[in-house]
Amino acid sequence: MRGLLSGLTLGLVSMAVWAGDWPQFRGPGGSGVSSDSHLPIRWSSTENIAWKANLPGRGLSSPVVAKGRVFLTACSAFQQTRLHVLCFDLKDGKLLWERQFWATGNTMCHPKTNMAAPTPVTDGQRVFALFATCDLVCLDVDGNLVWYRSLTSDYPTVTNQVGMAASPVLHQDTLVLLLENAGESFAAGIDAHTGQNRWKIERKRRINWNTPLLFTKNGQTSVIFQTPDELAAFDPRTGEKRWSYAASELATIPSPAAGDGMLLVPGKELLLLRPGDSAAPELVWQSARLRPATASPTIYKNRVYVLTGAGVLNCADAQSGKVLWQERLKGPFSASPLIAGDRLYAVSEDGVTSVVQLGDEPKVLSVNPIGETILASPVPADGKLLLRSDEHLFCIGAGK
């Protein structure tokens, strides 16, 4: 297979990430919810900063965390042709290693995004980084190259001149990609050990940025793909389709989320679906009032949270979809919110993080400016908060 470098391998057994790690976009289960109740509440660009690391270039990707290490991607050079994978020590922000690759795919994109838009994923033993150029890299946690693929070499018509952003997800030893674009569009299951295709299914040619969701119910895990006219579940090991739900005007930027055995599906209307084991899901409710913009929605403790394009945080009852309260925050927002310890962290494009105490009535605990543009979603890490701008990776120290 063209574009595949083999000959470097890892051990046969994949090690699970530690409890409390944040291994992928929006964390375990792609929910945007953390059990960490000790995240900081107040900080500024100079106060309560545990450390700040310089970055070599731009990126919309969020950091991922495993076993005390932070992995991140960036892009630099003329027309974003240089791709970076970096590893930092969570304790002090020390750069442990950096690896660079030349882009093999198209680097044209909207000025708001860049080639380091997809968030990497890790299993604690390896880190898998997909770039918007369709370069796919697997490194071990010490930065050694395991394998590399140029997907545009394998599939030359893949193209998206606006910019790709869907992040990979990992189920056991299968890496799942969703590449829907103006050219050849497909979903694929990649062998995490070798980089070879395990399965590949054709998808409609259309531009789509949302990330697949791993959803487990009754011990069975499915990967959920959302497209403008369908939500569908597939076996992540084989690519076999399990069920589909036809809909119209589903979102192509915010991603679906799971919680309480339900699926939260953004679009022109927000849908709450109750999936079965193999049959199409049941529609519980739909609401045009809860329409998200760019930020993905969240379901937590039987409530639904949505950030609108106008910067309004909506809280609704998950059983009925009834809006319980609204709170206007300092936006606009591209980053998806994080919920940790009954607090919601919403990071605006201006780098201002609003910390909201959740409950029957919202309470804004703090408004924290960092002084730099942030489009990446916030990440919890051992009682601290990681924020990523184009220039720096900030580690906000625990505090009250």
Image (cartoon, grey):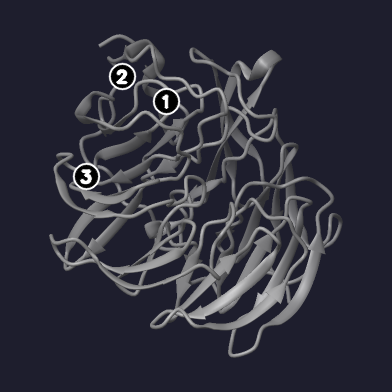
Q: CA distance from mark 1 to mark 2?
A: 12 Å
Residue at the spot of label 2: 8
Q: Residue at x 47, y 63 (%)?
A: 269
Q: Quadrant of residue 363?
A: bottom right
How many neighbours does mark 2 have within 10 angstroms: few (below 14), some (14-19), or many (20 or more)? few
**Which mark's residue is nearer the viewer, 2 or 3?**
3
Q: Amino acid at mark 1?
A: Val
Residue at the spot of label 1: 137
Q: Amino acid at mark 2?
A: Leu
| Sequence order check, earlier mark of 2 and 3 | 2
Q: CA distance from mark 1 to mark 3?
A: 20 Å
Question: Is 14 on the left-hand or right-hand side of 355?
Answer: left
| Sequence order check, earlier mark of 1 and 2 | 2
Q: Residue at x 70, y 28 (%)?
A: 56
Q: Amino acid at mark 3?
A: Pro
| Sequence order check, earlier mark of 1 and 3 | 1
The label number, if any, that marks residue 236 in the structure image: 3
